[in-house]
Amino acid sequence: MSARVLVVDDVPANLKLLEAKLSAEYFDVLTATNGPDALAICERGEPDIVLLDVMMPGMNGFEVCRRLKNTPATAHIPVVIVTALDQPRDRLQGLDAGADDFLTKPLDDVALFARVRSLARLKSMTDELRNRAVASRRLGIADPLAAAAAETGLNGRVLLVEDRPSVADRLQSALSAFHVVEVEPDAQQAMLRVAEDEFDSVLVSLDLQEQDGLRLCSQLRSLDRTRDVSVLLMGEAENRARILRGLEIGAHDFLIRPIDRNELLARVRTQIRRKRFTDRLRDSLQSSMEMAVLDQLTGLHNRRFMDTRLVAMFDESALRARALSVLVLDVDHFKAVNDSWGHDAGDEVLKEFADRVRACTRGIDLVARMGGEEVVVVLPDTGPKAAYAVAERIREKVENTPFAIYANSRDITVTVSIGVASRKAGDASSADIMKRADDALYRAKAGGRNRVIAANAA
């Protein structure tokens, strides 16, 4: 896949060389010669990935990386530290700064391109989530990017897929200081465990006896239930081709044996942090979707959703010649509840009322709060008699059990009036059913309240 790559290096020759190599692989290349310029480009949202040199005057690459990862607006951009420094402490410093990878010069072109493509894929997966999460701020949701950027990557659940006990013990011992680590020697069992449980990261050995670690990686990426878990491959230096193949399949990172303890901890922490970043954005998106269609007090669908969904339910009912009924419910004397006991007590009543209505309906029924104390229930495949029975069941459930208010310290009696209407052959739209149900509700209230009136009743 193509991506916009920002190359940051204060040596013009290095910039030109990387620009030429990446352009030949059909990447769009941006360049910067210092840290402040790189930060400005990233803040404008231009790059998909950053290749960052360490040794630069003024602000070195570690500091640039740290600022990018600590800023909510840029924390999602993958950063690869590219430098001549090759000591374990240098690699660890880069990973601790939040870098997604650390490549040493001279660069292996195949490894470079594989890494860039892998990280670009990861970023493309989160971009849409991130954009929607930003939009969710308008709905009053706390800033999801700030929360995601603050993730530490610690206390994760890690599954180690390794069939050599001595190696597994050593890796588990190193990781257990910061994470909950489980060991599974069998690749197929590992697949089942990840599918059935919640793991943040899976470390897969490419040296399994009579098992294929790459096939496990492929299976993890292919299933909806497991594709979001981070996958790190572990292999010998001579397995480099298989490791790069794993990145193409969808592994997120890799470790070359012998594995340095500090690098192991840093890479696992980075991957867990990235997974949780994406999870938080996904949760934020789910919250924003729920806020768009749900009433926040009662948890019922809101009027906007009901208006749209009722039209579709009516059209399907008419097309298939199936029954469709509507109940319109209104809590009796609700204003008196608010006036006598306060709006907080009124809210408690509405929430409990919504729960009781839900308890009397099916999963396929649509239950929505129209506003105030009025609720609408749409019953697909339900004729007039069955709809009347549902309405009467709701009325009895509301009347027979007092409503607790003031945190269960006081009980009050509440009743409900309900109008019922069903689709007729001559109905032109769902508005015709709603009008008859509203009229029936009016008659129920005029007739003394706490009763159910069907639209065809005299």
Image (cartoon, rainbow, N blue to C red):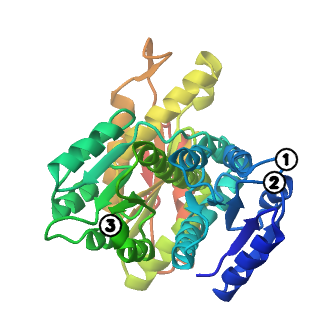
Q: Which mark is residue 35?
A: 2
Q: Which mark is residue 435?
A: none
Amino acid on which the number 2 mark rests in the picture: Gly
In front: mark 2 or mark 1?
A: 1
Q: Are marks 2 and 1 in contact (CB under 8 Å)?
A: yes
| Quarter assignment of residue 174 | top left
Q: Nearer the viewer, residue 38 or 337?
A: 38
Q: Nearer the viewer, residue 139 or 443?
A: 139
Residue 132 image position (x, y, % from top left): 65, 59
Mark-to-mark CA distance, 2 and 1? 8 Å
Q: Residues within 10 Å of mark 2 (few under 14, many from 20)?
A: many
> As drawn, is 149 to the left or to the right of 320?
right
Q: Earlier in the sequence, mark 3 or mark 2?
A: 2
Amino acid on which the number 3 mark rests in the picture: Leu
Residue 344 image position (x, y, % from top left): 59, 23
The secondary structure type at the circle numbered 2 is helix
Q: Which mark is residue 220?
A: 3
In front: mark 3 or mark 2?
A: 2
Residue 155 image position (x, y, % from top left): 41, 36
Q: Which mark is residue 58?
A: 1
Q: Earlier in the sequence, mark 2 or mark 1?
A: 2
Q: Is residue 84 above or below residue 248?
A: above
